[in-house]
Image (cartoon, helix red, strand yellow):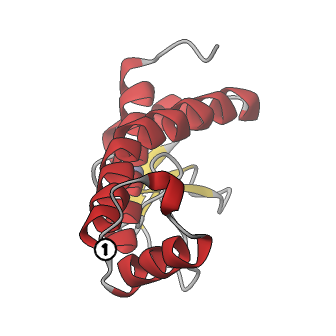
Amino acid sequence: MSALFAKRTSEPEICTICARAHDGLGYGKPVSGKFLWVCLECAPIAKRIEFMKQKDIDHYERVAISTAAQKIVQGVVTEVLEAVFRDGVTDLNTLQPEQFDMLCERMAVEGRMIEHGKEFLLAYAAEMHGQVSRGDAPF
Ligand SMILES: [Zn+2]
């Protein structure tokens, strides 16, 4: 019988469901030595994916990536356009590729892209967790 265990591992595992840090929780059969690593938030729903087919998990992942991308794209585009305008460009036809590259590099140095990456990861994790919790049809 599968169960949830507090486990220690020296491997850098991630949560099987949401891809965030696993919090040292393993779900599975103790005698098998194989566990699904899960985070605290996903632990209560780990049982739902124990026998899930890889193609179904892949579908959940595609939906989660698409949903997360949709959630962050407006913020990223808005921030890039604001940086372009702050740089004095009011007509995008005059924006030079080197100028755009420099603005993107500046945003990366300022950590704005890291913030957008975090937003993406959190949105992805929430969507994966939601699909598994709700038992969404994987098609
Ligand atoms: Zn998780």
Mark yes or no: residue 51 visible. no
Q: Give the image location of residue 6, x and y in percent.
A: 37, 65
x and y percentages locating residue 61 in the rendered image: 59, 38
Count of marks placed on residues? 1
* Front one among 38 and 1: 38
Q: Which residue is mark 1?
A: 87
Quarter assignment of residue 88 = bottom left
Q: Is residue 121 above or below residue 99?
A: above
At x 54%, y 76%, the residue is 101
Q: Residue at 36% across / 30% down in the picture?
A: 130
133 shown above or below 40: above
Quarter assignment of residue 59: top right
Question: Where's residue 29, x and y in %?
Answer: 58, 49
88 lies left or right of 16: left
- Three-letter code for the amino acid on which mark 1 is drawn: Asp
Q: Position of residue 107 (x, y in %)?
A: 37, 77
Which of 126/16 is in front? 126
